Image: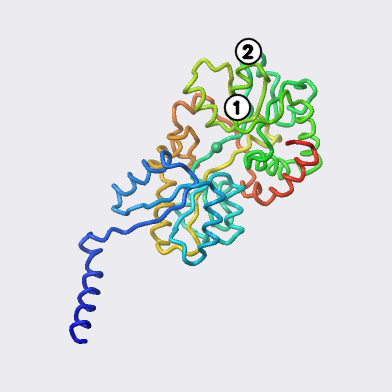
Amino acid sequence: MRALYRSLLLTTAVALALPVCGFAAEEVVVYSSRTEDLIKPLFDKYTAETGVTVRYVTDGGGPLLARLKAEGANTPADMLITVDAGNLWQAAQDGVLAPVTSPVLTKNVPAHLHDPEGRWYGVTLRARTIAYSTKRVDPATLSTYEDLADPKWKGRLCLRTSKSVYSQSLIGMTIARLGEEKTESMVKGWVANLAVPPFANDTRVLEAIDAGQCDVGIVNTYYFGGLIREKPALAVALFWPNQAEESGGVHVNVAGAGVTRYAKHAAQAQKLLEWLTEPEAQEMFAGINLEYPVNPAVKIDPLVAVWGSFRQDPHNVSDAGALQAQAVKLMDRADYR
Ligand code: FE
């Protein structure tokens, strides 16, 4: 008994001594719907700078959220990284994220790009904007998302499916901006102008414009970046709609992160979250996927910067989540499939 007691004491002493000696590295566990190629370089850098090990699991945003809910208080996850404010809003709504307030986060992430209650913060920014054929469209004839409902675009528009959370967020944010009635008439006009049924992804929309199936479409900026890097001769360009003072701005969305409600390493997770919004990590995180940094003080990747600057929709992106169910119903009524 005495021997056991002594060995327990010894174990405790060793355990306490380890962090001081630097043998037992601290760690953070991340669930990420961003793929390994997008996050590993960042986490490697974080570990090199801080000595903190970042362990991560990658999967779809839906499965990760289901897993967090099922694991409850037993989850090993300290942080959730996922794309689209709609998905982040849902995670917050489902109670798996903890509110975090931090002067670093408030300074680095503009107010409209994080949850007002601090349960998630945008870490990279993407715009969902108009793409057009440089062969068949004079950009002077483009103006707003609403204008794509005009009969002049009949048989010329390509869209991504309404099943995509990106489409749902765009329509949710348009409801926030214009109200339901105007948004519905816009979506009906879009549907009437479709050249072909909606596509499964944004790259198909861009390829269809390039191939002459349609002349205009709506895509996330980084898909354009990815495709143009592959095919520099792509006859497609981006247009920034709704730039007039009163017309709202370009629809933007985020990939974001939050500290989980049952984090075992909450303080470490918050430090990692803060680090992700600092200039060096921002430049790297945004650059890898040709996105925009959320931190306005950070340099934009040169490949992205050539598309020019634009005014963003200043509404809080969390509206995309709050209005998602309404958006889905509206698109259904308008026959947007
Ligand atoms: Fe995407």
What is the secondary structure assignment of the residue under circle 2? loop
Q: What amino acid type should be assigned to the residue bearing mark 1?
A: Arg
**Which residue in the protein does label 2 denote?**
135
Residue 211 placement (x, y as % from top left): 62, 17
Name the residue rendered at 59%, 22% in the picture. 207
**How crowded is the residue under tag 1: few (<14 C-alpha within 10 Å), some, or many (20+)?**
some
Q: Quadrant of ligand 1?
A: top right
Name the residue rendered at 77%, 43% in the picture. 330
Residue 70 placement (x, y as % from top left): 54, 62
**Which residue in the protein does label 1 denote?**
204
Q: Is label 2 or label 1 in front?
A: 1
Give the numbered dot on residue 251.
none
Quarter placement of the C terminus: top right
Name the residue rendered at 46%, 26% in the picture. 303
Measured along the vertical axis of the image, is residue 11 above or below residue 219? below
* Ligand 1 within 8 Å, label 1 CB: no
